[in-house]
Image (cartoon, grey):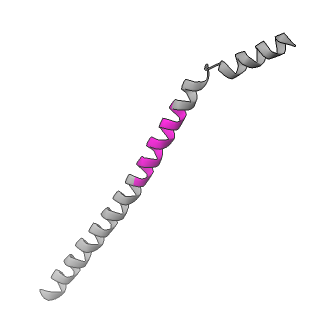
Amino acid sequence: MKRMVALLNNFTQDEQGQDLVEYALIVAAVALALITVVNNLAAGIASLYTSITTDLTSIGATQQ
């Protein structure tokens, strides 16, 4: 019985895989931030492109 208690205590106090979990959480947070930034940047670029093409179309129409 003492051996099982000792084994259980060793198991609960073992921190060997803790670093890996922490790094995985950091990588997941950075990936989520990058996805958000890229999506917002893509929407901004698409809006800018639409604005430029609309302006160029209106300039071409007024000069004819």
Taken as a whole, is the magenta stretch helix, strand or loop? helix
How far across and how far down the image is residue 17, in percent? 61, 23
State the residue at coordinates (49%, 37%): 27
Judge from the rendering whether residue 41 lies leftward or rightward of residue 6; answer left or right. left
How far across and how far down the image is residue 32, in percent? 47, 48
State the residue at coordinates (18%, 86%): 61
Tally of numbered discs: 0
Query: Please, is residue 48 above or below residue 24 in the view?
Result: below
Q: Camera-side residue: 2 or 48?
A: 2
Query: Please, is residue 54 above or below residue 47 in the view?
Result: below
Q: Camera-side residue: 8 or 23?
A: 8
Query: Please, is residue 48 above or below residue 12 in the view?
Result: below
State the residue at coordinates (22%, 80%): 57
Asked whether residue 26 is drawn in magenta, I would say: yes
Residue extending farthest right: 1
Q: Camera-side residue: 20 or 38?
A: 20
How far across and how far down the image is residue 35, in percent? 44, 51
Residue extending farthest top: 3
* Residue 53 seen from this side: yes
Judge from the rendering whether residue 54 lies leftward or rightward of residue 24; answer left or right. left
Picture quarter containing residue 2?
A: top right
Q: Camera-side residue: 49 or 20?
A: 20
State the residue at coordinates (72%, 19%): 11
Asked whether residue 52 is drawn in magenta, I would say: no
**Which quadrant would the C terminus be assigned to in this image?**
bottom left
Q: Which residues are magenta?
A: 23-36
